[in-house]
Image (cartoon, helix red, strand yellow):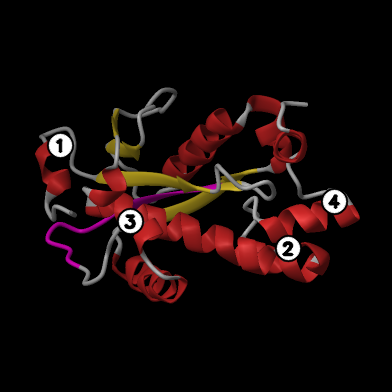
């Protein structure tokens, strides 16, 4: 359950702005991985705010607009398919997170990272497992990242309609597998992921 005011425990004389950071799209077979960083004002309360995975697409879209209007600062970034293949999905997700943090204006003094890895950031950071269900700023970031990635999936669906990206958002569904077997991978598919999905082992 979200704890409004969760971020305040990290405030100090040197830490005035705390951002929440989360990613979206580590598991899919195609498309970039996205991340968002979000600084919420003190006392910010938004009805319905929650971990993006617990919300419907319609609710995420509605909250996206409210978050972007109410945030002190927010930024959304991504890492490409090529970067995912080059450095693996974890490092690519961390790269997207760093890009989002660095794009914040005003800058954050401290970052709360959803998950269990907080290495490589240019500011003090703390990893929180299940943070998107605890910290409002992380929950907000999870929604921003998820909505941004889903919107890209709709664009990919228009460009490559044979794969059904609008339906499965790049995840390994039966429909997606059938499309891959029928048409082969597209330029936006992650080769290593597709090979593992179809043949059960790394390329």
Q: Residue at x 78, y 26 (%)?
A: 203
Q: Nearer the viewer, residue 92 or 193?
A: 193
**Looking at the image, is 56 positioned above or below residue 15?**
below
Residue found at x 80% / y 66%: 159
**What residue does disc 1 label?**
10
Determine if the magenta segment contains residue 42: yes
Q: Label 2: which residue?
A: 156
In the image: residue 53, left or right of residue 27: left
Marks 4 and 2 sit apart, C-alpha to C-alpha, by: 18 Å
Q: Position of residue 152 (x, y in %)?
A: 64, 62
**How many residues crowd mark 1 within 10 Å: few (<14), some (14–19), many (20+)?**
some
Q: Which residues are magenta?
A: 34-45
**Residue 146, position in %: x, y?**
48, 58
Give the farthest residue toward the right: 183
Rounded to the nearest whole Å, what is the CA distance between mark 1 and mark 3?
A: 21 Å
Which sits earlier in the primary sequence, circle 1 or circle 3?
1
Return the residue at label 3. Answer: 51
Dot 2 falls on a residue whose secondary structure is helix
Badge 4 marks a residue whose secondary structure is: helix
For the residues marked 4 and 3, what is the alpha-carbon distance in whole angstroms? 34 Å
Check residue 81 for magenta coloring: no
**Which is more N-terminal, label 1 or label 2?**
1
Quadrant occupied by the N terminus: bottom left
């Amino acid at each position: 359950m979200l704890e409004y005011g969760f971020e305040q425990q990290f405030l100090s004389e040197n830490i005035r702005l705390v951002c929440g950071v989360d990613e979206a799209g580590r598991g899919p077979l195609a498309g970039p991985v996205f991340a968002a960083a979000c600084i919420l004002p003190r006392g910010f309360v938004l009805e319905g705010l929650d971990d993006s995975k617990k919300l419907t697409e319609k609710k995420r879209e509605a909250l996206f607009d409210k978050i972007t209007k109410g945030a002190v600062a927010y930024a959304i970034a991504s890492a490409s398919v090529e970067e995912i293949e080059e450095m693996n999905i974890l490092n690519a997700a961390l790269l997207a997170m760093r890009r989002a943090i660095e794009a914040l204006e005003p800058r954050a003094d401290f970052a709360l990272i959803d998950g269990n890895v907080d290495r490589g950031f240019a500011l003090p950071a703390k990893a929180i497992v299940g943070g998107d269900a605890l910290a409002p700023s992380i929950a907000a970031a999870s929604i921003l990242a998820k909505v941004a990635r889903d919107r890209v999936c709709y664009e990919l669906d228009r460009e490559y309609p044979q794969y059904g990206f609008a339906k499965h958002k790049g995840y390994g569904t039966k429909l997606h597998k059938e499309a891959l077997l029928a048409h082969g991978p597209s330029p936006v598919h992650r080769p290593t992921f597709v090979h593992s999905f179809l043949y059960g082992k790394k390329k």
